[in-house]
Image (cartoon, rainbow, N blue to C red):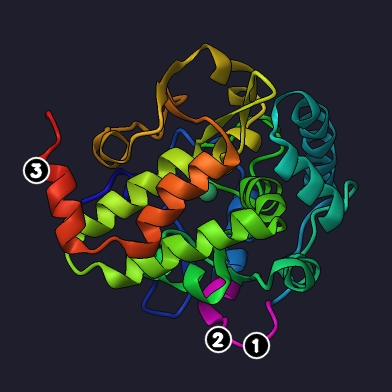
Amino acid sequence: MFEEAQYFAPVATKDDGSVVVELATSHPGFADSVYCQRRNAIAALALAHTPGSPIPTAEYTDEEHHVWALVTRELTAKHQKYAVREFLDAAQRLGLPGDRIPQLQEVGDLLEPLTGFRYLPAAGLVPLREFYGVLADGLFHSTQYIRHHSVPFYTPEPDVIHEVIGHANTLASPRFAALYRAAGRAARRVETDEALEFVSKVFWFTLEFGVMREDGELRAYGAGILSSYGEIEEFRGMDIRPLDLTAMGTTHYDITKYQEVLFEAASFDHLEDTVGAFWDTCDDETINRLLAASPA
Ligand SMILES: [Fe+2]
């Protein structure tokens, strides 16, 4: 139904109860049996987790902590040049460790006093209604594994670098956190799969891949751009279009490539007044009206 379903490696529970993450043959970690075993163990931890209990600790190797440190250092420098001020201020307040991968429990402990958000471990793809719905409760489903150490600046799937450097830094801002919660309320309010897909596409083109004009410069606030070493250097050259709910809710995207079409908010107020207000009030009927008015 939705492209994001292809984004995550499938997770299977076998008859004997063992959990297996089915990496594609093209995945950089496919032939690394030690990495595959760690992925299986981390997925099993997420599946066994019950809401309200502490998030189990994932084991990482020194090489993996090194990947985090390297990517953090490079992205932090790029953020100064390309990220919106609200993100930079929030990241400073959150104070993620730069030298090691933080546990998701620790991420929640840092975030909660700032905006009330906590993390939940996800083994892989979480159904859309559940993923977005719990945002309304201040909960964020997050993968816990990290990309393969052989290619520190590339991942074919959302990993802990994307989830934490991209999303947790954003969720440390009260203004962004309010938008995430509004998206969650919208996802719970709509009833049809079409309306839910529309809500999630607006999320994709804003909180994942949104850009904003700030002091005359185009800057990024989407977690997908801000966690991507390559994409953060490219977004200013993409097809930049004005913020438009119908266009965002109906534009096709390919998750395997850099986003070629991006939508620009004129300011933070513009984002809140347009997208925040939409999520605050939308229902199946308003989304059907927008779809009916869509030129395509
Ligand atoms: Fe994301």
Furthest residue in direction left, as rendered: 292
The answer to whether mark 2 is within 8 Å of ligand 1 is no
Residue 22 appearing in the image: no
Residue at x 46% of width, y 33% of height: 26
In screen coordinates, is 203 left or right of 71?
Answer: left
Calculate the distance from the C-alpha at mark 3 to the C-alpha at mark 1: 45 Å
Mark 1 Cβ and ligand 1 under 8 Å apart: no
Q: Is residue 214 above or below residue 41?
A: above
Residue 238, image x and y in percent?
Answer: 47, 15
User: In the drawing, does residue 111 fall left or right of residue 121?
Assistant: right
10 Å crowding of disc 3: few (<14), some (14-19), many (20+): few
- Tell which of 241 and 166 is nearer to you: 241
Establish if 141 lies above or below 60: below
Where's residue 88, x and y in %?
A: 78, 41
**Which residues are the magenta region?**
44-55
Residue drawn at x 71%, y 38% as measured from the top left:
149
Q: Amino acid at mark 3?
A: Ala
Spot occupied by residue 62 in the image (x, y as percentages of width and height): 86, 49
Q: Give the residue type that dot 1 points to.
A: Ser
Determine contact: label 2, label 1, CB under 8 Å.
Answer: yes
Determine the CA span between mark 3 and mark 2.
Answer: 42 Å
Residue 233 versus residue 104: which sits nearer the camera? Answer: 233
Q: Element under label 3? A: helix
Residue at horizontal 68 percent and vertical 53 percent from the top: 164
**Mark 1, residue position:** 53
- The residue where tag 2 is placed is 50
Mark whose residue sits in front, 3 or 1: 3
Q: Earlier in the sequence, mark 3 or mark 1?
A: 1
Return the mark for residue 292: 3
Q: Quadrant of residue 74?
A: top right
User: Which residue appears farthest toward the top when viewing the image?
Assistant: 237
Three-letter amino acid code of the residue under disc 2: Thr
